[in-house]
Every structure is written in structure tokens, then in C-alpha cells.
Image (spheres, rainbow, N blue to C red):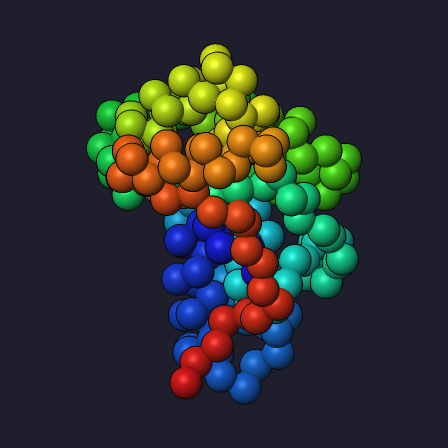
Amino acid sequence: MPYGLGSSSAIAACFCELAFEGKSLMQKWQAGRLALQKTQSPRASGLDLAAQLKGGVVYLKNHEPRGIAIDIPKEIFVLHGGEKADTTNWITNKNPDAGSVQKMGTSAEAFLEHRDWIKAMDEHATAQENMDIWPQNLRKLRDEWLKAKKVVSMKSCGAGGGDAWMAWIDPDNAEALTQESHERGFTLKRYDVSAQGTKFQ
């Protein structure tokens, strides 16, 4: 599964594995999906949850997680900035834009329909910006890199304002940006995907 998935889905997947031992994948997924809907909103995707449980990359069709083959472009990198947004304060004091919330909840499914990485990243970034939930240090860096055309697109991986950002970078710029990131105290690396779902020792 791609790292950088929503932390809430990772917690839900671990809970499902522990609480529903002996149940089928679909029974675990349905229980986790219901929990996400109750805690996040009826728009909660469930796609991350399915990937956490099943492993690899999945597609939800008729509310059933199915494995799919998808290549991660060499231009995809992840930047870790070490700062998370104060989402508790955001939820308490902000009134999220309904349209942006809906786009956030269905962004993964939308991408799997059109398979346009840059379009999907830009759409997700716009929704996140409208919700105003990004960590400030990475927001400033994103603005600088986009203005200087060092990156083509860049968005937060975490719907709740996590410290991991996905960036579409020309591989020729990767070495310089890796060094620049290090000098700022950030970490930039290629996107990594494994086929392992939630596992317990």
C-alpha cells in the first residue's frame, strides 16, 4: 500500500484485524467503513481502509475492494516536513466548505476514474487549500517551489493536514530539491509502494 495514507484508516484497519479475528476481509472492511462514516462523515472514502487491509492498491466497485494494477510514475516524490496541522483546533473553530469536503472524500475514486496524476493532485490541493488545513512551513515551501517551477504539482497526503506531501517533480530536479529539503530540515524521497496489508507479529 502507499505510505502516507490517512492515519484514521490505519487505526481502523488495525482495530478491525484485532477485533474481528476470523472474519472475512469484506466483514472487516464493512465494519471499518461504518466506523469511518460515523466518525468522519458519510463522505468518508474507505479506499485507504481497503488498501490497509488488503494491501497493494485497491479500487472500490459496488462497495467491494478489488485489487488493481497501477504504476507509480517516477516523477512522484514524498516530502516529509515534520509538522502536522492542528486539526482539533480546525474542526472546532472552522466551518469546512461542503464542496471541498466532498471532493476530499471522493478524490481517490475520482483519480481512479481518469488516472490523471497531475489533475488529481491539483484538484486535491485546491480542496485542501479551501479548507485551510495545511501546516504553514510546507505551505510556504509549496508556494515557493510552484512559483519557481521546481515542482509541477504538490499536495498534502493527509486529509487532516499531515506532515507528508506528495510532489510531481522532474527527476532532473530531484537531486537539487533533495539537498534543499535536507537543508530546511525536511526529507524528500521517491514514493514507495509495497503489496503488504496490515500485518501483526
Q: Position of residue 53 (x, y in %)?
A: 55, 68
Answer with the quarter of the image where residue 102 lies: top right
For image coordinates 62% across by 67% down, the residue present is: 195
160 shown above or below 144: below
Give the tally of numbered discs. 0
In this view, which residue lies farthest toward the top? Answer: 147
> Horizontally, is 186 left or right of 193 in the view?
left
Q: Position of residue 144 (x, y in %)?
A: 41, 18
- Name the residue nearer the viewer: 29 or 178: 178
For image coordinates 47% across by 66% down, the residue present is: 13
Q: Position of residue 151 (x, y in %)?
A: 53, 26
Q: Quadrant of the N terminus?
A: bottom right
Q: Is residue 106 visible?
A: no
> Horizontally, is 188 left or right of 61 in the view?
left
190 shown above or below 21: above
168 shown above or below 64: above
> Horizontally, is 173 left or right of 159 in the view?
right
